[in-house]
Amino acid sequence: MEQSGPPITFGRPLRAAQFLFSPSYTPLNHGSHGAFPLVVRSHQRALQDAIEARSDPFLRLTLPSLLLPARTAAASLLGAPVANTFFIPNATAGINIVLHNLTFHPGDVIIYLSCAYKACINTVLSLSATTPAIAHRIDLSFPLSPARLVSLLADAIASLRARGLNPRIAMFDTVATFPGLRLPWESLVAVCRQHDVFSLVDGAHGIGHIDLRHLHVTKPDFFTSNCYKWLFVPRPCAVLYVAEERKGMITRGVPTSTVLVGEGQGLQQLFEGTPAGDPTPYLCVEEAVRWREEVLGGEERIREYCFDLARTGGRLVAKELGTEVLDDGEMAECCFAMVRLPLSFDSDKEAGPRRLRAEDGPRVVAWITETLVKDHDTWIPVQYFQGAAWTRLSAQVYLEIADFEWAARILKALCNRVMNEEVPERD
């Protein structure tokens, strides 16, 4: 696999030569489901064939020895000890494992941000309905400064304590899903440590996206991250990091499996028991990390290209649309570009012709999304957010600025159709 000569060129040629996309498809939503190259696909197929050839010997005897180098590769990108890093199906599973292993008492509070992933919010709300835990949401309005977000968490903890409550754990993202912005998660962890609150970091958009090698310095209590989104690993695959002093808090998986910690078995056995599903995505992590290093030129080169493409591409799209990006500061230092669409929504229910009512927002963005698929063979997330229509574009090494130019033209044309009242009414 070793790449000889100069580093490979990023962009459309890489997409055509190394990835599995249809030639007609423009992949501008890497953040949702990720993608992986042909070499990783071949590696996975070989592993699947080996499992089917001798399933019991492979899954019961061979698998544990193969998982160790895979965990080592993942841990190296986290700057974390292998003994504290475990494979799980996805980041939402990690959130559930941590929260469902806590015993909540009256007055205990789970703090979360309004921009949290919906499944994670639902987990918190479910626990607040079935246990003594109280759910406390911190409402955010973007853009806002990292310092402001940090102060909001500190203020929430102080306010809850002043009411006689016990802020038990706080959940927040590395990079939020929507809006696609980078949060000051390191500083949020520090606030939690300062105030004796457990930190649960949802790094769904983390490994392979932003540099996480300082995890051992930041010291979150719990950290989970999807490998399939940004690391070029097949689905499903994620990692769960548990701080050494918190390992005793995790005694069972979700759902509960054949292993319970404390019955002569530890966390490694809990997460590496004979799987009912396909373990091969976990075993592709080492191959993916090697390909990123030897072929793409390493994590820093990947990040530099993607961050620059997201920022440059986002500005270009905003200029073409005559709008703006949501944030152009520290929180924009990631692989996402958040751009407002040129659609005016009026809270007045008697809005005149060519004026969209606020209640039209969900219907309009649904039509844009569907039309992008049907007429243009792409998927670009569009949501009605903070009273406007926003789109989130993903940057990746298989994309180039021409892809963002294309997206700008398509989005502008669709917005013109919306303002010309071409959006059908919903039944």
Image (cartoon, rainbow, N blue to C red):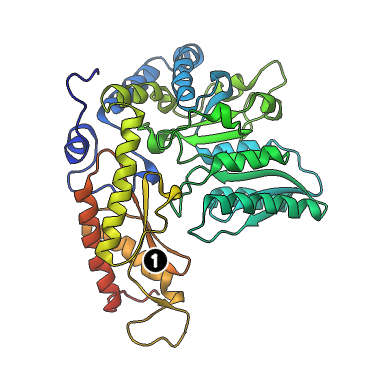
Horizontal relation, residue 24 to residue 256: left or right: left
Report the residue at 55% width, 42% height from top. 185
Q: Can residue 45 be seen in the rendering of this structure?
A: no
Count the numbered circles shown. 1
Horizontal relation, residue 253 to residue 15: left or right: right
Location of residue 315 in the rendering, given as x and y in whole percent from the top left corner: 30, 56
Report the residue at 27% width, 65% height from top. 321
Q: Nearer the viewer, residue 27 or 389?
A: 389
Location of residue 40 in the rendering, given as x and y in whole percent from the top left corner: 31, 26
Q: Vertical placement of 128 versus 360: above or below?
A: above
Horizontal relation, residue 154 to residue 121: left or right: right
Quarter containing the C terminus: bottom left
Q: Nearer the viewer, residue 68 or 351?
A: 351
Report the residue at 42% width, 56% height from top. 327
Q: Vertical placement of 159 versus 212: above or below?
A: below
Location of residue 278 in the rendering, given as x and y in whole percent from the top left corner: 44, 28
Q: Nearer the viewer, residue 350 or 176?
A: 176
**What residue type is disc 1 on?**
Ala
Label 1, secondary structure: give it. strand
What crowding class fits label 1: few (fewer than 14 Cα within 10 Å), some (14-19), or many (20 or more)? many
**In the rendered image, which quarter is residue 11 located in?**
top left
Quarter containing the N terminus: top left
Location of residue 287 in the rendering, given as x and y in whole percent from the top left corner: 35, 22
Report the residue at 37% width, 48% height from top. 336
Horizontal relation, residue 76 to residue 294: left or right: right
Q: Which residue is mark 1?
A: 389
Q: Can residue 209 be seen in the rendering of this structure?
A: yes
